[in-house]
Structure formats: structure tokens, C-alpha cells
């Protein structure tokens, strides 16, 4: 009987298990449906408005502008001479003060040769001239006697025989001897004068090439002399830069040039003038070469740093300004030769420009009416520039800079040697 009851109880449990499982599934489905039908509501708010990008400006003004062409040049002598003897002899001495680094005036005595032999040659030539003059005087007396005899003869002779009778050939020979003796005397006097070596122009002694006391032959160089009135500065520039300069002529000076050097005291400079453009290009490139004249380079007549031979200095040229150009900083020029401007409604305008000159710090462009009217050029970068996009201005100290005036003062790159 107990066994029968256990079986009945177990059979009842088996019958209830499916019902419990179905109830659990139904409850899960009900909960899932409720969750899906009651999703949380999120209130959508409008996105916050983004401020327009900020940009920096540079104000443009129309006016005469020009790049300041710069380059580097080396100082060379305008005139350098090796002073040599014209005659041979023993070099007695150099004149007082004829030492390297000293300035000598034009015509000043530099050195003297032993002149004893040349003085004797002059005396000999004077004696020869005196003898020739005496012979001429005797011959003239003979001619007078011949004329008297011919007149007493009373007969007419042919022109050839009459010339022989009147001793005309002998008189011409005597006169020729006098002329020859005169030339010999002048030659001896000239050689005597050449024993004194004088400066051909005002210059500085660069080097003495021989020492006194020794014998020198004719055309022996005694010393090296450099003209101190002016030096040349040989500068290499691009052909494009030459179009902005006045090369000058023989009568008029060219563009002014300011010279500076790191070796000079701070703020020191020299002035020069473009003299000419050389016909040949630079050996190591395609740069044009020009000469700048610098007067009183060693500052012997006035204050200023000395420009010495071989110095390499920076040259800043005063270019010829033009009225039909505008000056912009390099940051204002975009790819494709475009410029961004800001109109009166603070919106971006993109303009195409014609670039005339590209410098290291600024560019010169052809004057454009639209750009001149806009006046405000953007120098800041924009990630995604679009025509008409709204912008805001960042106030800076350079926002209202006058670029036309900057063109006359800010250095622009030309080309260095």
C-alpha cells in the first residue's frame, strides 16, 4: 500500500512540471513585452551653434611699393698696380713712409736708383750736342763763303750742281747731327729722371716686393699699390632682380646701395651706387653680376667702417618703386596665387591675383580693384575655406598694418652669391 501511494505521488509531480515551465515562459514573455512597449524617452535638444572661425587680418593700401633686393658681394680693387722700374740699376732706398699700409699721394717719390751712370750719360750727351752745334756753326760759315764764290763766278749752274757748290748737303748733315745729339740728350735726361720712381696715383702700399741695396733690371716690380679713391663690390643677383634696379651710365649714378657686415660695429653701414652690369654670368650658377662703386672705402676721408679688399658684405639695393602694385605678407598668398579677403559682412572672399615679385617676407602683386576695395586680407590658415563662410576677426597689433609702407622698410630677398 505504501508503494502504491509513492507511485501516485510521483505521477502527480510529473504532471505538474510542464505546467510550471509554461508558466515561467509566459511570465518571461510578458515581462519582455512590457519592457519593449515602455522604452525610456530621451528628450532631444537642438545642437549648440558653433562660433565662426577666427582669423587675423592685414590691411592693404595702394601706393608706390618696391622690394628691397638684397645680395652678398666681395670687395675688389678698382685699380691695383705693381710699380716697376723703367731702367736698371742699384736700388738705393725707398722713400720715407713707403711702407705697407701707408697712403702715398699722386706723384710722391717712392724709391730711387743709383743715378751716377745716368748723370754721366747726360753729360756725355750734352758734350755731343755742343760738338754738333759747333760743327753746324762751322758749316754755316763754309756755306756763306761758298755763296760769295758762286756769285763771283758769274755763271748759272743747274740746280743740282748749284746745291753742291753752295754746300747744301753738308749743311743738312750738320743740322741732322745737331738734332740727333738733341734727341740723345733728351733720352739721357729721361733715363736719369726714371731713376726716381713716383706714385702714378693716390694709393695705399700693399706690399714691398724687393729690398733696397740690390741691383734691379728694367721693368722689375718694386711694390704693389692700390687705389684708395674707390673699390668695387662684385654682387650676384637674379635676372629678375635687375629689372628693379637702375644700373646707371657713365654720367649718372645707379641705384643706391646700403652695405652692412657682421664684422662691423652694430648699426654701422656704408653707402654705394650701382655702377654697371657685367656681361658674364656667375661661374657657379646663372646669376647676373654687377659692380657697386664705394667711394673712400677705407674711410680715410670721413667716419665709417673700413671696407677692405676681400671683405664679403651684405648689399641692400634701393629698388625703383611702382605705383601699380600692392604689397602683401607671404602668409596672405595661398596655393594657386589666391588671396582670401573679408568683406563688410565678415564673410570669406577668394580672389585670384597676379604675383609680380616673390620675396622672403612679402610678395608684390598687380593692383586689383576688388582687392583694393576689400582692403582686409586674411593671413590666418583655415581648415576648410569656403566662399562666403562666416568668420570673426582676431584683434592684433598688426591688424591695420600699412603694407605699402612696409614694402619700403622690410627687407626682401634677392639672391646671394
Image (cartoon, helix red, strand yellow):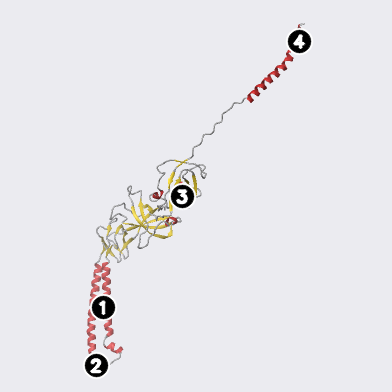
- Label 1: which secondary element: helix
Q: CA distance from mark 2 to mark 4?
A: 209 Å
Asked if marks 3 and 4 touch (Cβ < 8 Å), the reply is no
Q: Residues within 10 Å of mark 1 (few under 14, many from 20)?
A: many
Q: Which residue is mark 4?
A: 8
Picture layout, residue 113 above or below residue 166: above
Q: Earlier in the sequence, mark 3 or mark 2?
A: 2
Nearer to us in this view, 294 or 327: 327
Whether label 2 touches label 1, CB < 8 Å: no
Q: Residue at x 76, y 6 (%)?
A: 2
> Which quadrant of the structure image shows residue 242?
bottom left
Residue plotted at (28% across, 84% down): 169
10 Å neighbourhood of mark 2: few (<14), some, or many (≥20)? few
Q: Which mark is residue 153?
A: 2
Q: Earlier in the sequence, mark 1 or mark 3?
A: 1
Of callouts 1 and 4, which one flags the residue occurring earlier in the amino acid sequence?
4
Q: Identify the residue under disc 3.
A: 371
Q: Nearer the viewer, residue 354 or 247?
A: 354
Instruction: Report the residue marked by disc 1.
Output: 178
Q: CA distance from mark 1 to mark 3?
A: 90 Å
Pointer 2 and pointer 4: residues touching (CB < 8 Å)?
no
- The alpha-carbon separation of the residues under discs 3 and 2 comes to 114 Å
**Residue 357 visible in rendering:** no
Which of the two discs, 3 and 4, labels the residue nearer the N terminus? 4
Amino acid at each position: 500500500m505504501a508503494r502504491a501511494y509513492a507511485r501516485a505521488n510521483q505521477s502527480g509531480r510529473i504532471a505538474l512540471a510542464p505546467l510550471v515551465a509554461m508558466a515561467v515562459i509566459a511570465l518571461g514573455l510578458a515581462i519582455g513585452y512590457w519592457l519593449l512597449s515602455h522604452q525610456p524617452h530621451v528628450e532631444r535638444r537642438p545642437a549648440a551653434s558653433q562660433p565662426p572661425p577666427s582669423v587675423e587680418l592685414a590691411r592693404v593700401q595702394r601706393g608706390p611699393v618696391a622690394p628691397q633686393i638684397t645680395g652678398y658681394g666681395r670687395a675688389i680693387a678698382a685699380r691695383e698696380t705693381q710699380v716697376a722700374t723703367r731702367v736698371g740699376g742699384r736700388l738705393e732706398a725707398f722713400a720715407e713712409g713707403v711702407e705697407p699700409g701707408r697712403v702715398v699721394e699722386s706723384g710722391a717719390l717712392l724709391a730711387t736708383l743709383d743715378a751716377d751712370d745716368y748723370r754721366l750719360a747726360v753729360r756725355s750727351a750734352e758734350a755731343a750736342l755742343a760738338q754738333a752745334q759747333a760743327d753746324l756753326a762751322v758749316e754755316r760759315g763754309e756755306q756763306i763763303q761758298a755763296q760769295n764764290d758762286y756769285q763771283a763766278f758769274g755763271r748759272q749752274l743747274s740746280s743740282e750742281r748749284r746745291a753742291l757748290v753752295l754746300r747744301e748737303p753738308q749743311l743738312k748733315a750738320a743740322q741732322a747731327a745737331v738734332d740727333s745729339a738733341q734727341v740723345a740728350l733728351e733720352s739721357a735726361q729721361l733715363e736719369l729722371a726714371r731713376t726716381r720712381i713716383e706714385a702714378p696715383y693716390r694709393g695705399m702700399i700693399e706690399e714691398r716686393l724687393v729690398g733696397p741695396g740690390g741691383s734691379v733690371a728694367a721693368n722689375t716690380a718694386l711694390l704693389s699699390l692700390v687705389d684708395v679713391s674707390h673699390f668695387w663690390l662684385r654682387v650676384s643677383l637674379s635676372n629678375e632682380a635687375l629689372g628693379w634696379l637702375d644700373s646707371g651710365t657713365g654720367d649718372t649714378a645707379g641705384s643706391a646701395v646700403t652695405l652692412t657686415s657682421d664684422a662691423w660695429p652694430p648699426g654701422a653701414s656704408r653707402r654705394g651706387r650701382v655702377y654697371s652690369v657685367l656681361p658674364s654670368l656667375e661661374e657657379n650658377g646663372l646669376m647676373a653680376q654687377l659692380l657697386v662703386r664705394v667711394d673712400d672705402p677705407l674711410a680715410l676721408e670721413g667716419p665709417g667702417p673700413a671696407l677692405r679688399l676681400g671683405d664679403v658684405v651684405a648689399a641692400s639695393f634701393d629698388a625703383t618703386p611702382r605705383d601699380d602694385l600692392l604689397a602683401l605678407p607671404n602668409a596672405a598668398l595661398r596655393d594657386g596665387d589666391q588671396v582670401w579677403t573679408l568683406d563688410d559682412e565678415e564673410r570669406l572672399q577668394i580672389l585670384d591675383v597676379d604675383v609680380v615679385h616673390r620675396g622672403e617676407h612679402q610678395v608684390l602683386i598687380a593692383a586689383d580693384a576688388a582687392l583694393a576695395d576689400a582692403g582686409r586680407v586674411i593671413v590666418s590658415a583655415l581648415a576648410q575655406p569656403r566662399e562666403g563662410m562666416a568668420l570673426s576677426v582676431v584683434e592684433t597689433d598688426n591688424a591695420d598694418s600699412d603694407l605699402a609702407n612696409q614694402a619700403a622698410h622690410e627687407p626682401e630677398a634677392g639672391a646671394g652669391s
